[in-house]
Image (cartoon, coloured by chain):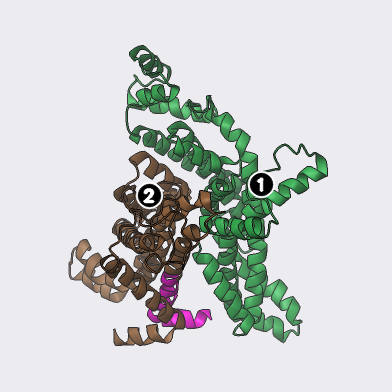
Amino acid sequence: MLSFVAQRVVKGVIVLLAIVVLNFFLIRLAPGDPAVVMAGEAGASDQVFVKQLREKFGLDKPLPEQLFIYVKGVVALDLGFSFRQQAPVAKLIGERLPATLLLTLTAFAISLMLGVLFGTFAARFAGTFLDTAITVFALIFYAMPIFWVALMGILLFSVTMDWLPSFGYETVGANLTGFAHAVDVAKHLIMPAMTLGLFFMATYTRMTRASMLEVKRLDFVKTARAKGLSDAVIQRRHVLRNALLPVVTLAGVHAGTLIGGAVITETVFAWPGIGRLMYDALLQRDYNLLLGVFVTCSIMVLIFNLITDLVYRLVDPRIEFAS
Amino acid sequence: MKQFWKSMLRSPSGVIGLIILVLAISVAVFGPMLFPNSPWRMVQRPFLPPFTLSTVPLGTDALGRDVFAGMIFGARVSLLVGLVSTLVALVVGVPIGAMAGYFGGKTDDALMRFTEFFQTIPSFALAIVLVAILQPSIYSIVASIAVVSWPPVARLVRGEVLSLRTREYVQAAVVTGQSNTWIILREILPNALSPVIVLASLMVATAILLESSLAFLGLGDPNLISWGYMVGAGRTVIRQAWWITVFPGVAILISVLGLNLIGEGLNDALNPRLSREGR
């Protein structure tokens, strides 16, 4: 178990280093001399200042050395400086990270629970009207662009029915504390989380359904039935548990998509997370910040993948940790 | 081939998907000829509600531009970007997967690490960064979508090639001294085609979603109108004018749905054994 975790962590760190190197070259792909761009962002472009910047960020040194300086900086959690926002990139991201984690994890939990639930229902009643209805809805949700779902949600639940707030993390100026504050945040969270979760819910529904139907035909299920186990026990203990394996794999694969969806969702709902930060960086062409968020997203995906790998091994005892 | 069409037409999702795709392609190809209204020109007063004037059936946006014209011209961009970026992704992914599966060993290891690396990077975030850095244009958009969508192709092709290269007819080709390139191109790849076709149809759908999301964030080609751009532009006035955001979104939904259904239909038609077992 421990050696497995260690192995995966080492692999993750290597991938992370590769991403940081990629990031370094992406910054250099950006149009214009980085020092001139930075000077422009800082609002001054005289020669002396540009030269100072060049020295400060080691841009006058050969490329390999620059790369080394950059990697060293990232390891020390220094992602550069955002001249537009006049703050270190790492600090800006740190402030926004909790909101993104709240949003993505809530969306993930909702989509997984509902997806497995609907998928199980569809498989249980395969061929009936219920199954068709669930399948059709899943197909439609699967094809809807997230930004459009978000806007339709606002149109329906904020503009027309006036049930839910259409933007932000909390009611501005309300100064709520304790439980009242939690309720306020939850109210603001429902729509973004549902929006983000809908696509994944559809995916998990389809996957669970297909996988349940496949497992159902296997021999060990027949054995269980022959032993006289009740249908409910067979469904829960034998079919569902095995059918969940591909769903867990899928959840790991989707970590990156989830983060990408968060960028869109946070943009539409003005949710103060790193996705919104990325959008702001994009509008202002603040490349340091943009790439800082990009690296952060990649780290989040790596961690999430590691967790799903562990969960997979917990759900499926056939796989040994030593391998 | 006849058999293929027969089973394709027997699957309901395949039929519905085909109808939607044919409709979408006709709109993209012939629409701009029949409705030459430029989607950028102001034709009526701003915020004209839909279904009030027959010349502007879907109303106008905040600048008085024809929403219907935008939908028709947008179909071109969406379908074109979807198709071309998928083709580029195939051109990258198929050779990488084929080489990894065929040569095995170190080549396989290196190529698959490379592929996994690209799969780990959050794809939409990478696409945003690439388009932002290369500056939004139809070329940078196609390139970025291709860059983030080739890894599944490589993995799929690798798996297929791995299982095909041990077959007797491939061994026979090796014994007769055919070159590796010839064997991969003539003996192996044609037999690995059907799952690739299924994946490609789903990839076009994903590419359309990606393009529209990029355009929504303001990363579309500034010279081309697209559905995502229209939704993004209508977003700030959604309280006054719902139609500007609703209609282009429906267009995206229907096209993506159509392509996904075609993917399912193709899967049923090309892998009949698999699909029957899966149900």
Left or right: A88, with B74 as reference point? right
Instruction: Say which colour chain A has.
Output: green
The range drawn in magenta is B258-279
Where residue A70 sits, quadrant-wise, is: top left
How far from the left and from the top, in percent, is residue B213?
A: 45, 53
Instruction: Say which colour chain B has.
Output: brown
Mark 2–mark 1 CB contact (< 8 Å): no
Could you tell me if residue A5 is visible in this image?
Answer: yes
How far from the left and from the top, in percent, is residue B41?
A: 33, 53
How far from the left and from the top, in percent, is residue A320?
A: 61, 58
Q: Which residue is mark 2?
A: B220
Give the prevailing secondary structure in the magenta stretch: helix
Disc 2 residue type (three-letter): Gly
Report if residue B261 lies within the magenta region. Answer: yes
Q: Which residue is mark 1?
A: A102
**Foreground residue, A61 or A310?**
A61
In this view, the residue farthest toward the top is A48
User: What's the mark number on residue A134?
Assistant: none
